[in-house]
Image (cartoon, rainbow, N blue to C red):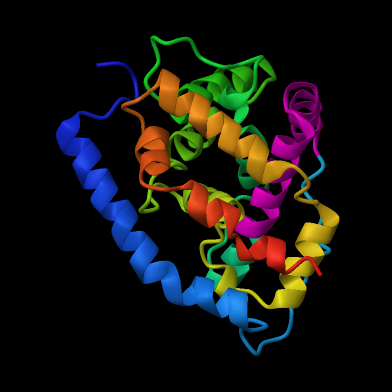
Amino acid sequence: MKPGELDLRAKLHFARQAVLAQLTGAPSLIRAHLTNGPRTPALLTDREPPDTPLTRDVLELAHASYAEPLLGHCLRTWLWGDLLGSLDGITPDAELLYVASLLHDIALTDRFRPDESVGCFAVHGGEVARTTLTSLGADSSYADVVAEAIALHMNIRPGGGPEARLLQAGAHLDVGGTRAGDLPRQTIREVVGRYPRHGFPSCFATSMRRETAERPNSRAAVLWRLGMRLPMDHNPLDRNVS
């Protein structure tokens, strides 16, 4: 099998997890659509990303590789993950989470898109990140953490270390609104105001259609066939802009 590809049994198991996640997450989505979120003070969103030689190099690569809607998604993913970490009492390595967030969709770009010998863009993206980070001087253990987080971010059930869990949570929130109801509306407005979502839903939908056609046995393909477009089109993050 190709790297990252699912066999029939794995696809059925993954599909079951996805359906159950949609059902259990429905109350949070409804709350996000109909209310102002939890009656708690808005989380502080004025936090700044880590500024180191490595993060500057990775950010430069991200700017050179991503279309603007995907770059905004990566930046929001970092901030959502950081905010959810504060909410859940999870403390990641700040630089690792930021770097993983910036690189997590790198394999959706034309520059780093895999050929058809690869079964999953996220697995390939993890390897791209590993190679890139070691070439920039990061040690192998650092690169391994980032690569694992990226490879796992398409999972339904979070796994790995704190950076992997928060990357998954932040990405799923930004794509489909997962856990949006756990955040005050003012917090959502501030994040989306800082990193606007202009063009993101259609851009990401195009990427997922392409992944489904080219990698039909991937996690992305299973999610797309299950109706991933519906929560994307009705993401409460877009309702909370105004």
The part of the chain drawn in magenta is 52-81
The quadrant of the picture occupied by the N terminus is top left
Q: Is residue 93 above or below residue 178?
A: above
x and y percentages locating residue 65 in the rendered image = 73, 22
Seen at 30% across and 25% down, the residue is 5
Residue 41, placed above or below residue 185: below
User: Which residue lies at the image location 76% right of the left edge and 35% below the top edge?
Assistant: 55
Pick out the residue farthest to the left: 9
Q: State the residue at coordinates (59%, 31%).
A: 206
Q: Is residue 156 left or right of residue 139?
A: left
Q: Residue 79: within the magenta? A: yes
- Residue 78 % position (x, y): 67, 50
Residue 99 visible (yes or no) = no
Q: How many marks?
A: 0
Where is residue 203 shown, x and y percent of the image?
66, 36
Asked whether residue 61 is drawn in magenta, I would say yes
Residue shown at 45% from the left, 35% from the top? 148
Query: Image check: 240 left or right of 48?
Result: left
Name the dominant secondary structure of the magenta segment.
Answer: helix
Q: Nearer the viewer, residue 142 or 100?
A: 100
Figure check: 222 above or below 123? below
Residue 62 x, y percent position in the rendering: 74, 28
